[in-house]
Structures are given as C-alpha cells and as structure tokens.
Amino acid sequence: MSKRKPLVVVTRRLPDAVETRMRELFDVRLSSDDAPMAAETMAAALRDADVLVPTVTDEIDAGLIAQAGPNLRLIANFGNGVDHIDVAAALERGITVTNTPGVLTEDTADMTMALILAVARRVAEGARIIPDDEWTTGWSPTWMLGRRITGKRLGIVGMGRIGQALAKRARAFGLQIHYHNRRRVPAAIEGALDATYWESLDQMLARVDIVSVNCPHTPATYHLLSARRLKLLKPEAVVVNTARGEVIDENALARLIEGGEISAAGLDVFEQEPAVSPRLVKLARQGKVVLLPHMGSATYESRIDMGEKVIINIKTFMDGHRPPDRILPSML
Ligand SMILES: O=CC(=O)O
C-alpha cells in the first residue's frame, strides 16, 4: 500500500467524534447530508476510493462491485448485518468486507425486550391516550388490558450474541427460554440461560407464546418465518423482529394478524425499508402491532463504538494486517 493516506468514502453522516477521528487518520470524503447515497455517487465512490464505509441503506450489488476501481480493497460496513452487500462478489474481486459486531448487542437486545413489553402491555397504544385527550374516565378494571409475560414461553430464532443477550433479559422477566439455531450453543451457555433447544423450528413455533427473530438475513433465512410456519403459531402468539425484515414473510404476517390467527407483532425492521406495508401501518393504528423505524442499535454509545470498530478495521487493514471483523466466506 502506498504512503499516501487512504481515501475513505463514507456514505452517511456518522457521530461527530467518529467523523473527527476519521479526518485525523484518513483522507476522508464524508457525506454532507444524511440521505442514502444516490446510485451514481455510489458508483463514483467505488471507482475512486481505497475504502468504502457504507451502511444498511446502501445496496451494494454485484453490478456496483463490478464498477469498483482498482484501489478499492476494503468495504468497512458501519453496522452488523451485511446482507445489503454482495459479499461473495466483493471477495471474488479481492475486496475485504468487515462489519461491527459485538458493540450493539446489548442495545439491540434491550430494544427487543422493549418491543416484547410494548406489545404485551400495549405501551405504544397507552402512550397516545393522554396526549390525545382520551383519558376521560380514569382508571378502569377492564380497560387497556394486555397480557402477562411472566411464565410465558419465548422462542428465540437465532441464538447468537443478540439472541443470548435477549435470553438473559427475558429470564429476568420470568420468561421460559426456547431457541432454534443452526447449531446448538455450548452446554454451559444453554445451562446458564436454562434454555431449551429445538432442532425443529416448526416444533418450537407451535409451542411458544412469543417468537423473536435474532438471526441474520442470508439466502438460507429469507422468509424463514414463511406463511406456512407463521400458521404454526398459537392464535395468542406475538412475533417480534429486530433483525432483518426479510426473515419474515411480512405480507403473510399482516394477513394472519388481520385474520386473528396471530395476536400481535412488534417490528423494528421491514422488507422494503423505509417503505412499510400499508397493512402493517393500518394494524399499528388499530393497536395490533408496534412499528419502530429500525432503532435497535440507535444509542449514542452503540453508534460511537460502531464507528470505532470501523476505524480499527480500516487502520488494521491499511497497516497490512487482517482486520478483526472480516466477513469470511464460511459466514455467508
Ligand atoms: O441493523 C443494523 C446493523 O446491522 O447494524
């Protein structure tokens, strides 16, 4: 690598502290506005840059990667999920891809717990009542009743870092932990979480009260919660997703909630962000689903730590070493 500072192109505004550090270390082209990069700007960035720092809002497909200039050696994603990047195409061209795992685990697990509570206890609906001047008769024995979560069964789909962090929290709320994962987690972790492993996702779905999606979106998990699988849930079941919209067949979920075959959902992620199915929006107005605009890792702390991870990945790579958070072909 030459002695010149690497040209690092960043597609979105990052926290001030992160941008300042990047300016010190790199020849950095920062985004002036906080909108997803237009396709032509992205193509130009890929042509010029040594390093691209995209986020989940940038679709970097094989066609764009084919237009990358000879200097582009690293795509250092600001975020955990890399399903918006054709990583296989990048690796084929000798471009390394990194992400920011670990630092957003606790915050995303908190948000998942928040959605579980919000749906079960009607928090979003309740929070609108006073500002909307609708609290006219005061406390009532029969009004705004939700569902107790203590003693219920939580089925976690994907027992990685975030799944495990959720399980810890959920146990403190008295939920029984069930999980499905490609691989069973080590016995010590399973024991500490008092978690029941289900090799068959179908069998787990039929038995849980709340299902939480915490696995990445890959070709193998696309519509993992298909219409057929969603129909296995009990009618009083709740579905929560803070991972990726694509893991659930969103239309099927909306249809089943409309028909009363599933009770409710709490969703932080969607199949076509930022577009959200009008059917889900209608269900949110009716108080049957809680919708959040992809906020799982949205804390100052997470976003600064994610920026630091991006910087470490770039620095390590530019110093000629393997960056810590490389995406390996075996992870795809
Ligand atoms: O969704 C956000 C991320 O993948 O970090």
Image: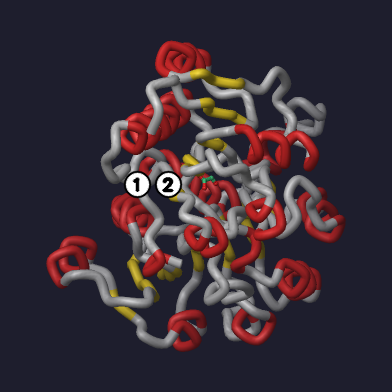
Please tell me whether residue 298 is drawn above or below residue 167 in the rendered image.
above
Q: Amino acid at mark 2?
A: Thr
Q: Amino acid at mark 1?
A: Asp
Residue marked by disc 1: 325
Q: Residue at x 55, y 49 (%)?
A: 115
Give the quadrant of residue 126.
Answer: top right
Q: Can I make out residue 188 in this image? A: yes
Q: Residue at x 50, y 86 (%)?
A: 202
The number of numbered badges drawn on the structure is 2
Q: Where is residue 124 shown, x and y percent of the image? A: 66, 41
* SS state under label 1: loop
Give the quadrant of residue 306.
Answer: top left
Q: Earlier in the sequence, mark 1 or mark 2?
A: 2
Please tell me whether residue 297 is drawn above or below residue 281 in the rendered image.
above
Which numbered circle lies on residue 98? 2
Q: Residue at x 47, y 42 (%)?
A: 74
